[in-house]
Amino acid sequence: MARRGRYEKTYEPKEPLSPWARAATMLVAFVGMVAFAVVLARLTLEPSAASEALTHSNFTPGDSIGEYLEQPAFRDTVKQLGGNILLGVPFGLLLPVILPRTRGLVRVGVATALTMVLVELAQGAFVTGRTFDIDDVILNTAGALLGYLVLGRRLGRAVHPRRHHWWHRFTRRNATDV
């Protein structure tokens, strides 16, 4: 009995999606990403004059998270930390569906981190009452990775099944070889 290598087992959908279902899924994901971009812009790029005196930039990872955890109001802590994590989840769900090259945990994480760094830089430079916070980038990226692991990976593979490249014939065994 031959042993299988640890990289040979892959998820393949039972039936590939029809071209119409695939196009519809990608369209829905694209519309979802546009809607998410609008919500992201409204949440992060609107001025907040009321909190202008309270804002300060944070370039040290963990400082803001520590401050939130030390707050006596548990509701505010959950709102800040959970809200930043939830804000990243749509990236992990939608990126692998819209852009098949972003499939993979590292790729989703890098794409989300780069996008969120740009959002934070725009906040700090152009928006009154908002500043750059590296912890927001970390929490948003964690949310994207969570979304990818929970559902984004399966969605991406259902819409964009793995291609069988010429080099796979050297790494995969035929059913008759096993």
Image: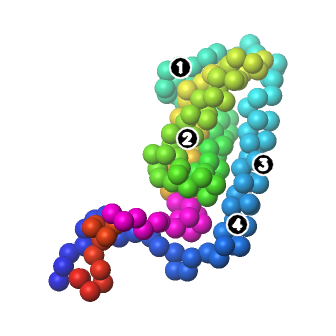
Question: Depth-wise, is mark 1 or mark 4 nearer the camera?
Answer: 4
Which residue carries the number 4 mark? 23
* Residue count near mark 2 (Cα–Cα under 10 Å), binned few <14, some 14–19, many ≥20: some
The local secondary structure at tag 3 comes to helix
- The amino acid marked with disc number 4 is Ala
Under circle 1, the secondary element is loop
Q: x, y percentage for residue 98? A: 64, 55
Residue at horizontal 80 percent and vertical 23 percent from the top: 48
Judging by the rendered image, the residue that carries numbered circle 2 is 111
- Frontmost of labels 2 and 4 is 4
User: Where residue 131 sits: x, y (%)?
Assistant: 67, 20
Q: Amino acid at mark 1?
A: Phe
Marks 1 and 2, how far apart at CA: 20 Å
Q: Quadrant of the C terminus?
A: bottom left
Q: Which residue is mark 1?
A: 59
Which residue, given by chain and number where applicable, does mark 3 sit on?
35
* Residue drawn at point x = 60 percent, y = 66 percent: 159
Residue 46 shows in this picture: yes
Q: Is residue 97 left or right of residue 175?
A: right
In what element is the residue under mark 4? helix
Q: Quadrant of residue 11?
A: bottom left
Q: Are marks 1 and 4 in contact (CB under 8 Å)?
A: no
Q: Position of residue 57 (x, y in %)?
A: 61, 17
Disc on the earlier residue, 3 or 1: 3
Q: Mark 3 packing: few (<14 Cα in 10 Å), some, or many (20+)?
A: few
* Residue shown at 40% from the left, 64% from the top: 165
**Which stretch appears magenta?**
153-167
Q: Is residue 158 magenta?
A: yes
Name the residue type under label 3: Ala
| Sequence-earlier tag: 3 or 2 | 3
Are the residues at dot 2 and dot 4 in contact (C-beta closer than 8 Å)? Answer: no
Whole-Å distance between the Cαs marked 4 and 3? 18 Å
